[in-house]
Image (spheres, rainbow, N blue to C red):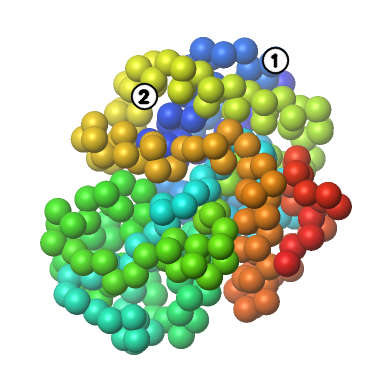
Amino acid sequence: MKLRLGFSPCPNDTFIFEALVNKRIDTLGIDYDFFLADVEELNSLALKGSVDVTKMSFHAYAYAAAHYLLLDSGGALGRGNGPLLVSKKKIYPDEIEALQIAIPGKYTTANLLLSVAWPGAVKKKEYLFSDIPEVILSGEADAGLIIHETRFTYMTMGLKKIADLGEYWESFSGMPIPLGAIVVRRDIPHDTALKVNDTIRRSIEYAYKHPKASVAFIKQNAQEISENVIHDHIGLYVNDFSLSLGVEGNMAVNKLFGIAMERDVVPPLPDRIFLISHLSGDNHIC
């Protein structure tokens, strides 16, 4: 069986998938036709249901849930790793709703968190995530949401942090922040989907055990090739939740969607959203 697989060129994703796509591990009879794309492009493709297995933002998942189930392995959740709202000059939180804000995509989890935290901040424009620092520096936007590698380099560009949306979420919910998910099409046979999940987990385990094996693939695709930045990026976004959502991960995802639905930021979700649920009664979004 051949499946179409999409993931981003960011170091956390290339670290996770390198062993799988280069067949350093047994892929359990599944061949992967893979491609790399920016997260918002991956979101757009997933909204059409056109990829078998893909990385996507949790925000976008709310609009694509009819097509996909959330895999237990490969996702990006954690603490202290949320998107940052930054600007060229000092701006106070009570000024945020008046700002022109550059966002890395309508369906990114960064934009979802901004909508939950500051619902009145509606003057937004979408840009490629790597272009946002320059957009702010040029004065085209008052502020911007930064994700991925730019989270580690914004201070060297002279930008200042206005708010850490990860800190906001953790303080508000007490949960880790769900950022990116790996999903599988609902019409793929359950046994095959489980093999996909298992293969992704073993790809991560291989990457941890053989860290040098993925270096060339990661550098080849990274926006920022500094070894320190790449190392910090992987350390921040690849963790135990990437190996398995577990009970806490399932709870965090349900909490995010529950609050977003309460505030009319996302539409209602199907009854079942996880391929593997660690919660009794499967989904109880609250």
Q: Amino acid at mark 2?
A: Phe
Q: Residues within 10 Å of mark 2 (few under 14, many from 20)?
A: some
Above or below residue 210? Residue 243 is below
Left or right: residue 64 compared with residue 204: right
- The residue depicted at 76 percent of the width and 44 percent of the height is 277
Please, which residue is most extreme toward the right here? Answer: 281
Q: Foreground residue, 58 or 241? A: 241
Left or right: residue 157 versus residue 9 is left
Question: Which of the labelled discs sits on residue 9, or is there none?
Answer: none
Left or right: 252, with 115 as reference point: right
Q: Amino acid at mark 1?
A: Gly
Q: Is residue 98 above or below residue 162?
A: below
Q: Which residue, given by chain and number where applicable, does mark 2 sit on?
A: 217
The quarter of the rendered structure image containing the C terminus is bottom right
Q: Position of residue 166 (x, y in %)?
A: 44, 61
Query: Picture coordinates of residue 254 (x, y %)?
Result: 68, 59
Residue 29: which numbered mark, if any?
1
Secondary-structure class at tag 1: loop
Q: Quadrant of the N terminus?
A: top right
Element carrying mark 2: helix
Q: Position of residue 194 (x, y in %)?
A: 74, 30
Q: Is residue 85 visible?
A: yes
Reading the chain from its start, which is encountered first: label 1 or label 2?
1
In this view, 106 is above or below 242:
below
